[in-house]
Image (spheres, rainbow, N blue to C red):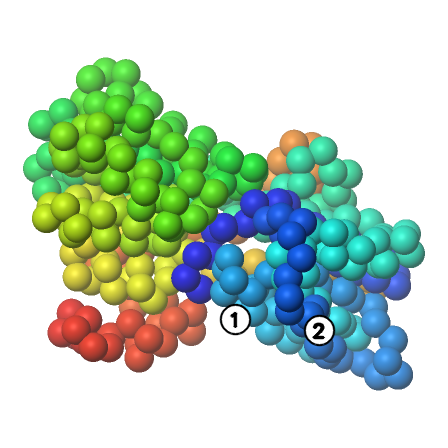
Amino acid sequence: MKNLTRRPLPVALAVCALAVVVAAGCGSSNKSSSSTTSSTSGGGGGKIQACALLPDTKSSTRYTLFDAPYLKEAFANANVPAQVLNALNDSQKQKSQAQQCLAKGAKVIDYDRLVVGSKAAYYVSFDNVGVGKLQGKGLVDALKANGAYTQKPVISELNGGITDNNAKLFKQGYDSVLDPLYANGTFVKAKAGDQFTDWDPVKGRQIFDQMLARNHNDIKGSIAANDGLAGAVIASLKAHGLKPIPLTGQDATPTGVQFILAGDQSGTVYKSVRKEADAASAAAIAIIKGNPVAGVNGTVSGTKSILLTPVWITKKNYKLLFDDGFLKKSEVCTGKYAQYCS
């Protein structure tokens, strides 16, 4: 789960009596040399009532490690025959996959991020503005903890993908925390210090290198929209012989948690993919079986929504990830990082 938030196009889950589609948007229409990955679960007779469409296997390992097995498990437990497909970063392939199910008259549930302009029946995700607020508050807390808060620190922001609606919501959240501090002079935004990265750590590293150059190596804190981008900042700082700075992340990856334990990263946002997949599959199953959809707790852009609560992870509470089964201790507390685990 190394770069979990790189999800440039929207995710949709479409359901009807015959088909359920869970679609995570692909990043481009470029063909992949690999074939579509598929698997089935639940039911018999070869009939498929649920189709899960995932975007690729490279931009985010969450789709193969978490979403796919969790969705399959949920549908199997409900005795709903299901198929999991991966478009391997080919948007045309994914469109074709979705159309095969949507042509049967499916209704849509947007899953993970809202499909802008869609006519979704439901939206299942985390409170993504809330994710950004956690990042902004986490950065502020870290700057207070290291004494830089009162020193007019120069702050940079490495945003996600400019075409990703979630990235915009994350930014809306952390900007709501940081913009007033820029406005009153408490913080100073770095020159060229607010850029989108396409969720690409390589691009993020290049951008942060340039930010350091433009700001005379005097950046005292940074928003990194996910752990992959945080790793890019850390690598850049080390390459320039600079000390760690207050730095955010997202996705609670093993590497991100290691950086937190080592003092290179301040925190990360944990979003339980199991809870999200369970909520989405439960909504889909309810529609398939003609039952009311439970858990609706808000409305986003006019769409009835099930919004889950993210958690800010630091050194103080990282073991929650082990307790929840999200990460294994052996994935984090290994090699030189074992010394940081009690």
Q: Residue at x 38, y 28 (%)?
A: 176
Residue 55 in the image: state x and y as whole percent.
63, 58
Q: Quadrant of residue 90?
A: bottom right
Give coordinates of residue 182: x percent, y percent.
26, 21
Q: Secondary structure at mark 2?
A: strand
Q: Residue furthest right?
A: 104
Q: Quadrant of the C terminus?
A: bottom left
- Which of the two discs, 1 and 2, labels the residue nearer the N terminus? 2
> Looking at this rendering, what residue extends furthest in the top direction?
184
Residue 212 at x, y = what percent? 21, 35
CA–CA distance in space, label 1 to label 2: 14 Å
- In front here: 339 or 109? 339
- The answer to whether marks 1 and 2 mark residues whose Cβ atoms lie closer than 8 Å is no
Instruction: Give the camera-side residue of 339 and 200.
Output: 200
Q: Which mark is residue 38?
A: 2
Q: Residue at x 56, y 69 (%)?
A: 64
- Is residue 258 found left or right of 105 in the rendered image? left
- Residue 65: give its label: 1
Q: Position of residue 237 (x, y in %)?
A: 18, 47
Left or right: residue 77 compared with residue 228: right
